[in-house]
Image: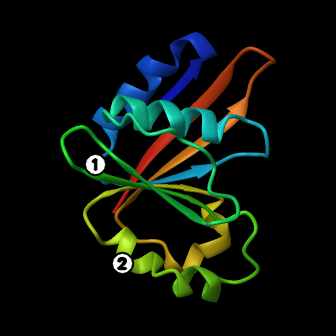
Amino acid sequence: MIKNYSLEELPKIANEIIKSAKHKVLLFYGKMGVGKTTLIKEIVKQLRSLDTVSSPTFSLVNEYHTTNGEKIYHFDFYRINNENEALDIGVEEYFYSGCWCLAEWPDKVENLLPLNSVTITITSSSDQLRTIELRNNG
């Protein structure tokens, strides 16, 4: 799936991602400031979580809960120096938990990523538009 979208279309794009994803581990690629966290906030909302979503830059992982009792894990690997830091928080247990896992900067833990995942690449087409490319892996 490749689509262009504006900020107003975020709810629609988030729903399309949820419906198109064949796996619950979503890997978000894109430059700083392109809108990864903004899109993740909307995906969490569309998964029916009422929790406040913020980037887990310093904690590495935030946990959110849906209204039907499911857990969603949000990772931000930007500040880690090596994959051992991710292993220390038990990232593999999260990835294989069966819960939604939304990971920013997954290239920092490339060797730990599950084969069954969804790659989401966001690029800026203009000030107002973003392009999203979704690819199911595994």
Residue 71 in sight in this render: yes
For the point 72% across and 74% down, which residue is it?
Answer: 80
Q: Earlier in the sequence, mark 1 or mark 2?
A: 1
| Label 1 to label 2: alpha-carbon separation | 19 Å
Circle 2 — which element? helix
Report the quarter where the C terminus lies.
Answer: bottom left
| Amino acid type of the residue tagged 2 in the rendering | Glu
Q: In this figure, which residue is indicated by the disc labeled 2?
A: 93
The three-letter amino acid code for the residue at tag 1 is Lys
Query: In the displayed image of the protein, which residue is found farthest to the front?
Result: 51
Neighbours of disc 1 within 10 Å: few (<14), some (14-19), many (20+): some
* Left or right for 3, reference 131: left
Q: Disc 1 on helix, strand or loop?
A: loop
**Number of numbered discs on residues:** 2
The residue under label 1 is 22
Residue shown at 52%/20% (left/top)? 10
Tell me what residue is drawn at x 61 percent, y 33 percent.
38
**Which quarter of the picture shows residue 12?**
top left
Percent across and percent down for residue 28 are 57, 50
In the figure, is residue 45 to the left or right of 75? left
Q: Which dot marks residue 111?
A: none
